Image: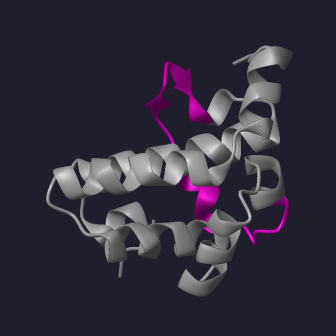
């Protein structure tokens, strides 16, 4: 699925700090915790709580946020539609990564089991 260059540029310049409070509000409003939110963000990006806070304090853009992350090898297993876009069809890597994050936060808020959100293999 094609995103426009303007859309991709807007996402790249958006700061993680501007979106993070919305993630917290969304998951807590649905009975999940900030700790669970951090768990899914850590799974996707490799950032621990301390590093996440640094990135928030520094007001890094999503571009910087994902350039510095170590994307989970199973991130490509995140599929579905978020914000009107089918994730697996998004061609721009950064936009796809931001939508991965949006999708797992959405799954957390919807009450999905943690092992499903974290794409853990079945035993």
In the image, residue 50 above or below residue 90: below
Specify whether residue 111 is in view: no
Question: What quarter of the picture does the C terminus occupy?
Answer: bottom left
In the image, residue 41 above or below residue 104: below
Query: Which residue is found at the position 83% from the left and 27% from the top?
Result: 9
Nearer the observer, 58 or 112: 58
Q: Is residue 72 magenta?
A: yes
Which of the 4 image quarters holds residue 92?
A: top right
Please state if 104 lies on the left or on the right of 58 as rendered: left
Nearer the observer, 122 or 45: 45
In the image, residue 67 above or below residue 13: below
Of all residues, the one furthest to the left in this rendering is 31
Q: Position of residue 2 (x, y in %)?
A: 75, 16
Please state if 1 lies on the left or on the right of 13 as rendered: left
Q: Is residue 40 magenta?
A: no
In the image, residue 74 above or below residue 21: below
Query: Which residue is found at the position 75% from the left and 59% from the top?
Result: 65
Query: Which residue is found at the position 55% from the left and 75% from the top?
Result: 42
Magenta segment range? 67-87
Which of the 4 image quarters holds residue 39?
A: bottom left
Question: What quarter of the picture does the N terminus occupy?
Answer: top right
């Amino acid at each position: 699925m094609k995103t426009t260059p303007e859309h991709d540029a807007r996402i790249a310049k958006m700061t993680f700090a501007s979106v993070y409070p919305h993630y917290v509000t969304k998951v807590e409003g649905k009975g999940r915790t900030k700790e669970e939110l951090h768990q899914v963000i850590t799974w996707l990006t490799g950032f621990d709580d301390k590093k996440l806070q640094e990135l928030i304090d520094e007001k890094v853009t999503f571009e910087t946020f994902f350039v510095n992350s170590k994307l989970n090898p199973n991130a490509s297993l995140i599929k579905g539609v978020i914000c009107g876009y089918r994730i697996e069809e998004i061609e721009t890597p950064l936009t796809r990564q931001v939508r991965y994050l949006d999708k797992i936060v959405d799954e957390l808020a919807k009450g999905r089991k943690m092992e499903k959100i974290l794409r853990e293999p079945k035993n």
